[in-house]
Image (spheres, rainbow, N blue to C red):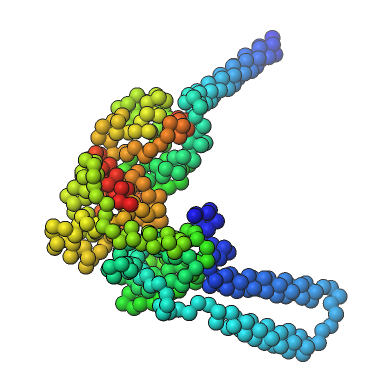
Amino acid sequence: MTTAISELQSVLHPAGADAAIIHQFSWVLFVGGAIIFVAVMALLALGMRRQARPVRPGLWIFGAGIAFPVVVLTALLTWSTWRSAELAPQTSHKALTISVTGKMWWWEVRYRDPASGREIVSANEIHIPVGESVYLGLTASDVIHSLWVPSLAGKRDMIPGRVTGLTLRADKPGVYRGQCAEYCGEQHARMAFHVIALPRPEFDAWLARQAAPAVAADTTVLQRGRDAFLAQSCQACHTIRGVTDTGNNLQQQIADIARRGPDLTHVGSRRTIGAGTLDNHRGTLAGWIADPQAIKPGVFMPPSHDLDGETLRALATYLEHLK
Amino acid sequence: MRNLYCQYGGFRTLLRAVAALACTILTSACHQSDASTEATRVAGGDPERGRLLTQQYQCAACHFIPNVQGANGDAGPSLEYMGRLSYIAGSIPNQPDNMIRFLKNPPAEKPGTLMPALGISDEEARHMAAYMYTLR
């Protein structure tokens, strides 16, 4: 499913119709600009020759200075207007809708479960079906962010208090890296995500798995990890459906309102942690829990210096287990 | 006579210089061979592959490791001089076999450690151990 090239975050490797149009625009501008630059430099060199021929200023001013730009820019405007009209319409009509909220410094992603109609909350990965138009409803909860997956589409700003939108369509399955494209604070550079384009049946199966509550902790180590999660009050910021929404409802309500941190119901199924900062396995999870400030300074999560080794390992193993 | 003496003195100085140079070369050669035996002390371990594995497993999420890309986290100790430390994790004699065992399953070797077992294979641990001994 994944290939190295599709994981490159690159404008030069389009994987969707819109990205292909942008890619074509880019090359026309690069090549056209280069040709005009070389021509101007050649004229300059000719003009600096010792025995330069006298020129007719009128011809050059009106020809190269006015007529040429008018013709070239008019042609470009016509062509780009025509091509832009072929970009996918920015509408949720007849499109799968996914909402993405930019947060300092991660992405909250919400899907609608077709079976129950409930929202499924996840983070830092946007799964989409291949070959279908997907409309991302975008907003931000703190400062302005911008969502950009160069292989699939252009950028779209995410503005607190407003909803913007972006249509995505991936023409081939793959993993496409994206990142925040609007400076949003200390960890702007570590605010990445992946768009994972799956064939429709795989996407449906994935969504059904995500809709389910967290898998049970069925060994002593996993139970110890789950208990540590609750004892450390991780649920003040993080949700694990099936674990944090039972019993003490008050804390869950607080988490729902604030939702400082990503939903961890299926955290073990994600590729990375810390919004693309580290690969996801029990080692990096343990390191992250122990001291996120060393890995991503300024992030809202505090370090846990009071966990003993065995508990920390159990907690990391438990989170890894939440596939 | 004075000439002779001078020549003799010059010869002695030259001898001393040569001896000193020889010593320097010998000692540095000793150091070098020392380091390389440490590095290849792990039979079948390839330090460069070990370095790449260390990067792949993202050991830098918790450890500072020179020449390994990553976050250089501080949950675990710096591995800058891992190859010349006497003990692994502060208590296990720093021997290749111990190192390999520790990398594969840290809690089994040192109960209570923060470091989890990452499912590192025998062969991977061998390469990573070889790399650890180059950190001096």
Q: Is residue B30 visible to the viewer in this orientation of the structure? A: yes
Task: Residue A68 in the image: state x and y as whole percent.
Answer: 71, 84
Tell which of A198 and A74 is nearer to you: A198
Image vertical order of residue A113 relative to residue A280, above or below: below
Q: Which of the 4 quarters of the picture holds residue A74?
A: bottom right
- Closer-to-camera residue (A186/A169): A169
Instruction: State whether residue B114 is above or below residue A253.
Output: above
Q: Is residue A160 toward the left or the right of residue A80 in the image?
A: left
Q: Is residue A303 above or below residue B115?
A: below
Residue ID at (56%, 23%): B29
Name the residue furthest top. Answer: B1
Query: Who's the residue at 42% across and 70% down the image?
Result: A146
Q: Residue at the location (28% across, 59% down)?
A: A212
Q: Position of residue A151 (x, y in %)?
A: 52, 65
User: Residue A140 is drawn in which quadrant?
Assistant: bottom left
Residue A225: x percent and y percent? 23, 45
Residue found 62% across the figure and 15% down from its top: B15
